[in-house]
Image: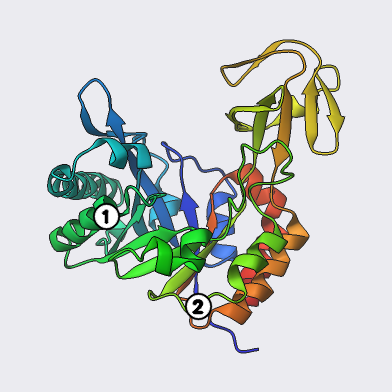
Amino acid sequence: MEKNNPEHSFYYWKTTFKSDSGTAAFINKENIQHFYIHFFDVDWDDNLYMPAPVAEIQDFKNAAPFIQSLITPVIFITNRCLERMDNAWCDSLAVKISNKIAFISNRLNEINAQAKKSIDEIQIDCDWTASTKEKYFHFLQLFKQYNSDKIISATIRLYPYKYFEKTGVPPVDRGLLMCYNLTNIKEANNSNSIFNINDLKQYLRGSKKYPLPLDVALPVFEWYAWFRKGSFMGIIYPGENGSFIENPILFKRTGNNFTLNSDTTIMDNYLTEGDVLRQETPDKEELGESAKLLLEKFSGLDRIAFFYWDSNLINKNKDVIHSIYTAF
């Protein structure tokens, strides 16, 4: 099978840059040529009654290993923001986001003067819906006008990928197909909402050719879906070491479900006795199998990315990451 030789890429989704002694070595070993760097989110501010930036990346002192490669700024716009703002905000929002990207890019270049690079691509990430599609697509058209010298890409979830004739195609230059978060995390009976190879097959097989050139992203992250009496309460992330789940006094384990034996606080969340945490992380064998599916479905990929960069998770998944990069 002919290899596509796409760029090796990763998403960086933290609000501060963190690196350790193995960061540069892993980047070099796996020939990671590109990073999608999350610059900020845009959400609706109920007090200001307007869209506002949140979760902005701020601490740049450890950025060097990540910005030696090509970078693409990523801005996540919440669907809640699109629902609340009227259409007149689209033009202003396009200008404000463009200006803020330029400001953050300049700060990055200030600390990386020796490897100063221009930004050739900007990515917009949004889970648009039928009710917000028109507004979102209008925003993208305006944003493209204000950034006509750049490639504008958008994330594409699997449902709008397969059913694009129904959901629409964003007016951008490229799409990045997000091959994860395949099922509803709020369903207590789901075993793994992040990744399931059978779900991926259903979306890929039989689908028509998407009208945009596509790259792909695969998951190497984990979280815990939190339930109380069968009702979804939220997501709890493992933090720096995730060791809280291994406490046999605190939890009773049944498969990937951890039932709380007593009240406790985890990551600023108050959990009560009987609450259940469902551990979700991609199965390594299924993740490896996905490479074959993607090779069969797509030819000429420019880039294959993993979401997201975390040293602990990379160490746990380094073999499958290497095998997938090698497959392409």
Q: Position of residue 62 (x, y in %)?
A: 42, 42
Nearest the eye: 254 or 86 = 86
Residue 300 pos. (x, y %): 48, 82
Q: Quadrant of the N terminus?
A: bottom right
- Above or below for 283 versus 224: below
Instruction: Check the picture and name the quadrant holding the C terminus.
Output: bottom right
Separation (CA) of disc 1 from disc 2: 23 Å
Foreground residue among 145 and 159? 159
Residue farthest to the top? 263
- Residue 69 appears in view: no
- Mark 2 highlights which residue? 208
Instruction: Pinpoint residue 265: horizontal percent, then vertical percent.
Output: 64, 14
x 71%, y 43%: residue: 190
Name the quadrant containing residue 53: top left
Residue count near mark 2 (Cα–Cα under 10 Å), binned few <14, some 14–19, many ≥20? few
Residue at the extreme bottom: 2
In the rendered structure, which amino acid carries the disc numbered 2?
Answer: Lys
Which mark is first along the chain, 2 or 1? Answer: 1
Closer to us: 166 or 211? 166
Q: Is residue 127 left or right of residue 320?
A: left
Q: Residues within 10 Å of mark 1 (few under 14, many from 20)?
A: some
Using residue 57 as the reference point, say whether residue 22 is left or right of it: right
Residue marked by disc 1: 134
* Residue at screen point 59% across, 66% down: 203
**Of the pair 138 and 23, the residue shown nearer to us:** 138
Which percent across, then down, holds residue 234? Answer: 58, 29
Q: Which residue is drawn at 85% across and 30% down?
A: 253
At 37% from the left and 52% from the top, the residue drawn is 130
Amino acid under disc 1: Glu
Which numbered marker is on residue 248? none
Circle 2 SS class: loop
Q: Compared to 278, does 71 lie above or below?
A: below
